[in-house]
Image (cartoon, grey):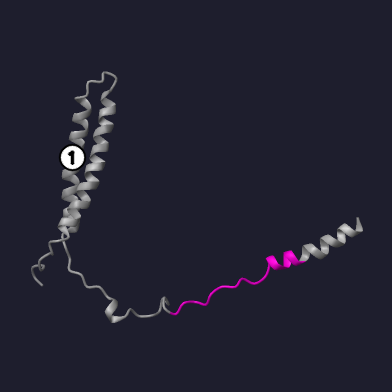
Amino acid sequence: MKLAGILFVVLGFPIAGAAQAPRIAPRASTVFAPSAPPAPGMQVNLPETHWKTGALVGGLGLGIFGAYAGYGLCMDSEDPTISTGACVASGFGGFLIGGLIGGVTGAMIGGLFPKGPVPGE
């Protein structure tokens, strides 16, 4: 019993000491310092575009069409077990899918058109 206690103390304490050793970490980066001013060549000066308008128009337009198509295709099915609630869910799914596709496409198309100068400037 004494031998087991001695072995536990001799073999157990170095493991506990190693678990509490100081953590070795890399030095703080000087490249990403928060107080460093931005480099003059790194500032992006892009013109304002109509991407938000395109996303809104495309998303709503294709979303409404998707809802109409999803609901209409569901109601035209010949399966008598389909309820109106299931068709409303199909219409909602069509709105989401159509809105996503139309919104992304509209944003890409609207991003091609720069905004004109604001009157009075």
How many numbered circles are shown? 1
Q: Where in the figure is residue 43, as x and y percent of width and height?
A: 27, 75
Which amino acid type corresponds to the residue marked 1 in the rendered image? Ile
Up-down relation of residue 80 to residue 61 (above or below): above
The quadrant in which residue 24 appears is bottom right
The prevailing secondary structure element of the residues shown in magenta is loop
Is residue 29 shown in magenta?
yes
- Magenta residues span 14-30
Is residue 70 shown in magenta?
no
Residue found 67% across the figure and 70% down from its top: 21
Is 56 situated left or right of 32 in this image? left
Q: Where in the figure is residue 41, as x and y percent of width and height?
A: 27, 79
Is 117 situated left or right of 97 in this image? left
Please, which residue is most extreme toward the left here? 119
Q: Nearer the viewer, residue 119 or 26?
A: 26
Q: Nearer the viewer, residue 120 or 21?
A: 21
Task: Kindly identify which residue carries mark 1.
Answer: 64
Is 82 situated left or right of 62 in this image? right
Q: Where in the figure is residue 80, as x and y percent of width and height?
A: 26, 18
The quadrant in which residue 77 appears is top left
Residue found 25% across the figure and 42% down from its top: 97
Q: Where in the figure is residue 71, as x and y percent of width and height?
A: 21, 31
Task: Quadrant for the N terminus, please.
Answer: bottom right
Residue found 52% across the figure and 77% down from its top: 27
Up-down relation of residue 41 to residue 90 (above or below): below
